[in-house]
Amino acid sequence: MSKKNKRGKLKKTQVEQILDKHKIKYQQLQFSTHQDGDVQTLDVPDGMDQHLMYKTLVLSGNKTGPLVGVVPIDVRLNEKALAKVSGNKKVEMIPLKKLVKTTGYVHGANTPVGIYEKHHFPIFIDSDAKNHETICVSSGQVGRSVKVNAEDLAQLVHAQFADLEQK
């Protein structure tokens, strides 16, 4: 459970502090999680549109090395589409055991904001995000997210929009 400050608000994550520094509006969100095998999985509340919840996937390309794909949690990433748009011939998911070493985040806490701030990996966001006023991405802790405008997010992390959903 995340700590709260004296006023009962959630203590800001490093990602939220970065968003504040760049004057990007966001809303803090906190979700319960459960253990699913060896990873923590987010419990999306009933009534919340899962298509507006985005996961941050870290892959490795044969030319670029590490790169990031950001897609709704209810879709699968099209690795061929990501490879093509990123200038790679092939991309594949970073193994779970190498994730923290590569990004600094555990599974379920990877965030495009924190990854860009620390590593400047190329980031690609599914183009469907532009069809919504806001999307939710992890704020760098398991169970914590931020609701943010997709265009503002893309500008901050120098992301490119692309069709990444596997059909």
Image (tube, rainbow, N blue to C red):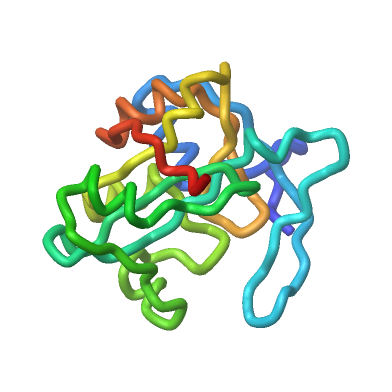
Quarter assignment of residue 62: bottom left
Nearest to the observer: residue 8 or residue 21: 21
Identity of the residue drawn at 40% across and 21% down: 151
Q: Residue 54 versus residue 84: which sits nearer the camera?
A: 84
9 lies above or below 87: above
Where 54 sits versus 156, above or below?
below
Give x and y (percent) for residue 57.
44, 57
* Total marks in image: 0
**What is the quadrant of residue 160 in the picture?**
top left
| Image: 161 above or below 110 | above
On the question of residue 156 being in view, the answer is: yes
| Residue at image location 78% in from the left, 54% down from the top | 43
Q: Quadrant of the N terminus?
A: bottom right
Q: Residue at x 40, y 72 (%)?
A: 99
Which residue sits furthest left?
63
Residue 48 is drawn in which quadrant?
Answer: top right
Measuring from the top left, give residue 61's x and y in whole percent: 22, 63
| Residue 13 at least partly seen | no
Residues 80 and 25: in front is: 80
Residue lying farthest to the front in this orientation:
167
The answer to whether 97 appears left or right of 102 in the picture is right
Residue at point 38%, 66% (across, down): 104
Question: In this view, which residue lies farthest toward the right?
Answer: 46
User: Where 161 falls versus 145 (above or below)?
Assistant: above
Tell me: 130 left or right of 122: right
